[in-house]
Amino acid sequence: MAIICRVHAFLCGVEKRWIAKKPVYASDVEALQSEINLSLISARLLVRLGVKTHEEALLFFKPTAEHLHDSFLMKDMDVAVNRLIEAIHGRQKIMVYGDYDVDGTTAVSLMMGFLQELSADCFPYIPDRYEEGYGFSFKGVEEAAAQGVSLIITLDCGIKDGKKIDRANELGMDVIVCDHHQPEELPKAFAVLNPKRSDCPYPYKGLSGCGVGFKFICAVCDQLSIPLETCFQWLDLVTIAIGADIVPLTGENRILAYLGLQQMATQRRPGIAALLKSAGHEEKPVGITEAVFLLAPRINAAGRIFSGRRAVELLMTTTTDDAEIVAAAIEENNKTRKELDKSITLEAIARIHNDPDSSGRFGMVVADPNWHKGVVGIVAARLVETFYKPAIVLVEKDGILSGSARSIDGVDLYDVLQTCEQYLLQFGGHTMAAGLSMEKEKLDEFREAFSREIGSRLHGEQPIPSILYDEELPIHAIKPSLFHVIQQMEPFGPENMRPVFLAKRVISGANTKKIGADRTHLRIHLMDDHERSVTMEGVAFHQAHWYETLVSGDPVDVLYSLDENHWNGRTTLQLQVKDIRRHEA
Ligand SMILES: [Mn+2]
């Protein structure tokens, strides 16, 4: 039971470091307050996000399509647009190639939908996770040639697939790469759209793969004098990709997600509606949280357990009946995924517990021939949650180990893998998540090198998980107007997280009690020790071990955020308690 608890909580029971975010300049806060009527706390929150003027506040609170950047600022965009228009008008066959994850399948669905609207001769291609693996594949290239394709568009992949692109060129096909992964040597493609290219002047670098695809179709519309609004029907897909791919929710991504959520609220795509229905979330509002926790895992489950093609089929379907049939199949895939996720996580945790050397290591590497390759990324993430160290989970097949890696804040995984390159056959990814493969014989050497490299980046000290908080805010000072401002700050995500507050020296009211099936959570009532006139109610997940302290009346410090509780038709402001510790006088 203890292990299961740890799997689902963020290191519950482990002491975390509480770190105040960097202070903001009082002059900036005063300047903003002189332009807008805001409380001190609200103004500080906004200044911390870089909002310092009335105009910046307007853009932040009410983003509009006019604020999107000109797509043609992206390097190679003109070349890519002209080539695609030539293919459309010349009735040349186009393969739309994308990865099997959420970013890839949403990108393919977006591009396919757009090309079909322009009556292009096109078809989607999603690689098989098991046969072809991640990225642009030789099999895909051969398939394109066999089908008489002239132009291949790769989405969310291609930047590291130079050899496959060379082969496509050899076979007389042009390739347009739309990717957002970190480039090294650029592939010799017809055009390479990637805001992270060192020679790309595009002002926003945080786009998802689907987001790059979106900029591409916007540019085509621009060139063909088609209203830009035509592209907005696919903003729901861009939004889901932003949530799933853990890209920052700042700048242009914030605008895209804001507009995408509006679009999802007014015109729900049949596939999305069917997925929400099968998740038991029909007719309810959808925010970025639902995109991340309800939609993304299901879209991913199709690719993990069956095929990413099923996800594309769902997202492209135009009728409710068809959508519900595919959604039912995906729901089954998701059930299987959950079972595998749980059983393999438990095995991997046991493996690490039983390895006497593991506690001294800075990174964890586990491998097994019987594990399901579709869930290795999720299991790696659970290991990070449990042990707070970078983790790699590998599956062996025919002497080759392949799998996924996940990291912790402050350890650049891509950089670590690059320094271990000599042991690897392949690797690719980002700071926090990556994929890799190696020969079985290299495992032990790699494990040591991986741990050593991480250790040197952490200066030889085991990392302590930390929680960042924005401001100190006593319980009695919480105002509904502050919550109103916080609501306007949505959608939340990386680099724009829901604000967290510190309340020092608080005590529990009489009604605090344990809740949940296994009594691991608390319904909590808190007040300031020195100002007991105001009590706030809230929830504290995985904090039941604080129950005795709280009911004894000892003062504690808490980190919390604010949200709403909907109960019996009533909506009340409540605390979401993140962490608790004893108050030290
Ligand atoms: Mn991606």
Image: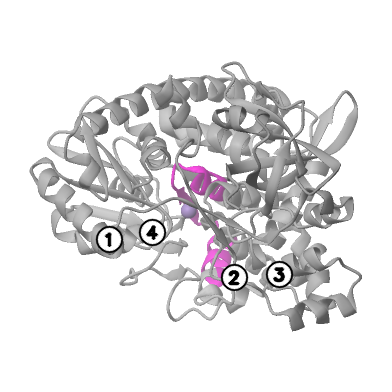
Q: Residues within 10 Å of mark 2 (few under 14, many from 20)?
A: few
Q: In the shown orientation, is residue 449 left or right of residue 20?
A: left
Q: Secondary structure at mark 3?
A: loop
Looking at the rendered structure, the secondary structure element under dot 1 is helix
Residue 70: % across, % down: 66, 75
Q: Is residue 147 above or below residue 228?
A: above
Q: CA distance from mark 2 to mark 3?
A: 29 Å
**Mark positioned earlier in the residue sequence (4 or 2):** 2
Label 3 or label 1, whichever lies nearer to me, is: 1
Residue 22 circle label: 2
Mark 3: give few (<14), some (14-19) or many (20+) Cα within 10 Å: some
Contact, mark 3 vs mark 1 (Cβ under 8 Å):
no
The label number, if any, that marks residue 501 in the structure image:
none
- What residue did someone put label 1 on? 416
The residue at label 3 has a CB less than 8 Å from ligand 1: no
The answer to whether the residues at label 2 and label 1 have Cβ atoms under 8 Å apart is no
Instruction: Give the x, y percent position of residue 46.
Output: 74, 68
The percent position of residue 119, horizontal first and vertical second, equals: 64, 51
Q: Amino acid at mark 3?
A: Leu
Q: Which residues are magenta?
A: 81-108
Q: Earlier in the sequence, mark 1 or mark 4?
A: 4
Q: Which residue is mark 3?
A: 68
